[in-house]
Image (spheres, grey):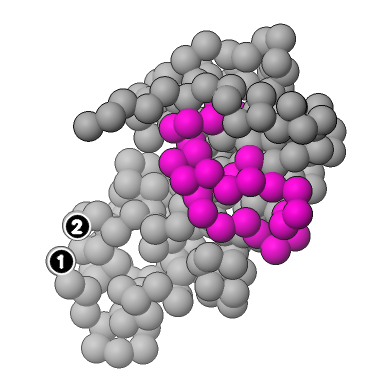
Amino acid sequence: MEIIFASFEFESAAQAQGHTHIAGVDEVGRGPLAGPVTAAAVILNIANVPEGLADSKTLTAARREVLYEIILASAHCCIAHASVEEIDELNILRASHLAMERAVAGLPQAPCHILIDGHMIPTKLKGRATAIIQGDAKSLSIAAASIIAKVARDRIMVDLAQQYPGYGWETNAGYPTKMHQSALLNLGVTPAHRRSFKPVHNMLYQDKSVTL
């Protein structure tokens, strides 16, 4: 398997086109049954890029926490969310795009160009963005955004786990692990659950069973 290392290649290409402030954008939380979807936008300081930036999924939780603080202290950042209610109303794809649009809009410095993880560009970012498949593993700016979004959302889920104990959100972040699905069956649906997601929808409106 080819090992990919994040670099400044895409940022340099944007700079060559005259763009000076380039933001990396990523989101986390499309798959969970509970909690918001969270996005981050990051404009790195080219003269002070933190060492060790990589796709957040490849880093330990402890390393993400360290880098989170370093990135916040050295770069322009914004964290934004789309709520459970917005996910249920819009669908998860549109809600994740809304969170990304909010993150870009909230940056203290407006970006000249935007690098987005994935293959789709949110509507309000079209015309000034580039979509990069596996961007969180290829672009340092997107990697930084992936770390910020992951840590921010994990912290939200730890807080929600204290409000709604028994689902294991402090460790599974709301993803449909066996423990989470078992708790959903035994404890029921909470206000933090996404009612448009099939296991939760089934609990509420169909046979109230969860496949384990």
Q: Tell me where residue 89 appears, x and y as whole percent.
A: 59, 77
Q: Please give the range of residues in magenta.
A: 115-141
Residue at (36, 89) in percent of width and height: 205
Residue 36 percent coordinates (x, y): 54, 56
Q: Is residue 14 above or below residue 29?
A: above
Disc number placed over residue 212 in the picture, else none: 1
Q: Residue at the left extreme? A: 212
Outermost bottom residue: 206
Q: Does the magenta stretch include residue 124?
A: yes
User: Which three-letter amino acid code belongs to the residue tagged 2?
Assistant: Lys
Residue 98 seen in render: yes
> SS at mark 2?
helix
Crowding around mark 1 (Cα neighbors within 10 Å: few <14, some 14 to 19, many 20+) is few
What x and y, as percent, mark residue 145?
Answer: 58, 35
Tell me the number on the disc at residue 178. Answer: 2
The secondary element bearing badge 1 is classed as loop
**Labels 1 & 2 near each other (Cβ < 8 A):** yes
